[in-house]
Amino acid sequence: MSKVSELSPMMKQYIRIKADNEDSILFFRVGDFYEMFYDDAKTASEELDLVLTGKDCGTEERAPMCGVPYHSCEAYIARLVEKGYKVAICEQTEDPAAARGLVNRDVIRVVTPGTVIEDAMLEEGKNNYLAAVAFAQSGVGLCFADASTGDCHITSLPAEDFESKVKDELSRFSPREVLVPESIKAKSASLYDYLSREFPAMVSERPDSSFNTDNTAALFNEHFGVSELQRLGIEPGSAMAAALGAVIEYLFETGKSSNISVNQIEVYTDSQFMRLDMTAIRNLELTETMRTKSKKGSLLWVLDKTKTAMGKRLIRSWTEKPLLNIAAITARQNAVDELCSDTVLRGELAEYLSGIKDIERLMTRTVYGTASARDLLSVAATAHNFPLIKQLLSSAECRLLKEICTDIDPLDDITELIDSAISEKPPVTVREGG
């Protein structure tokens, strides 16, 4: 790389921003393109089959460069993330036409395998989990959070024989990325070897301070409030709190914002779900076949007749985590029995559910501020079905269906606001009006 003092002002800006994002491929916005330079350009050109060119940067030697159009960048980012890279998106933070001299730029988000929220990069019927493994004297804390839906599951495991239990939980949730402390090798060499050599996900080593609940206490207060954690039974200073803190900090850091959607926390224990080890999950072919690793031919493939993306994710979760609580099992069976017996109710519900969009992921993009006008129209179109579904369920007799009916909010105020504010056929970007 050339001497920084000889570089053009824009390339000096690039070098400064890249220094803060050394572990990511930097998508540097220049006009209608995201450009990559130096080693990033060489990597991206090879992984994405892009032409590697050069750019004048104020020195005799041209900087290696490649680029992608900004309006079709998602497909390229998805391919890099799928291959296990992190991508830092650096935008122009002011209007180039109004800028005096060099346009201000800054990283607005870092996309990693475990922090993806875009539909184009996600599998509709499967959660995209970010996991964290935290160590404490009492045992190990595990947190599994889906940044795209807000789902978050936390548990603690006793210190005895924790390695095999951690492996089983990771196998069950199949996270795309796992956060571990830098000191993991000293705490468990066998788990470190398993994650780095065998587990099919990105492993991101984080400073030990990220797992220190004294350091992350402010994050809890800001996002949940201490009383909320205590209500859920998460003790300050526990391994569970450390794992959750590491996840929240990472989502804040990569999203460059405190607006994250993780809000549905479930603390689970051995007594709630059947604990299946890796071998049982594989041999039972619960969600994929042993031979082809595909859903077709698995138990999930037989069971999944759901009408919505959220339903697909829910039935996968139920299949991977069989209930043990008799009362919960009976409540679920009674609901299934009523829907099987009442063909009219089942048919009408299926019809209305067919019009339900992936509201969980739409709301997440709204929270992050990346939702388009078309996304908001999808929210309104979905919410128009809520009163109809609520009306259908009002005649249900079993407890579980009655609870679902009570929990449905028609969102009349939201639909009215969206319908009045956005034209029926809005353009792709907000800047175009409508």
Image: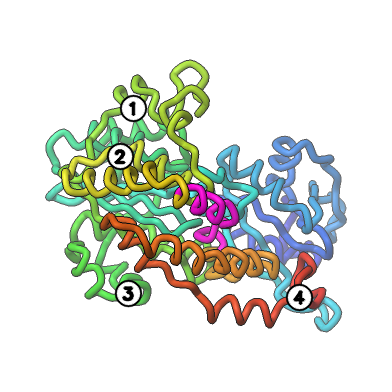
Indicate which disc residue 423 carries.
4
- Quadrant occupied by the C terminus: bottom right
Q: Which residue is mark 1?
A: 281
**Cα–Cα gap, marks 4 and 3:** 41 Å
From the image, state whether disc 1 or disc 3 is nearer to you: 1
Q: CA distance from mark 3 to mark 2?
A: 33 Å
Say whether residue 247 is magenta. Answer: no
Local crowd size for mark 1, using a 10 Å CA cut-off: few (<14), some (14–19), many (≥20): some
Q: Residue at x 77, y 53 (%)?
A: 72
State which tag comes first along the sequence, 3 or 2: 3
**Looking at the image, is 75 positioned above or below residue 198?**
below
Q: Residue at x 68, y 82 (%)?
A: 420
Tag 2, which secondary structure?
Answer: loop
Q: Which residues are magenta?
A: 346-362
Quadrant assignment, res 358 = bottom right
Residue holding disc 3: 218
In the image as oriented, which residue stretches furthest toward the top? 291
Residue 211 in the figure: left or right of residue 92: left
The three-letter code of the residue at mark 2 reads: Lys
Residue, disc 2? 321
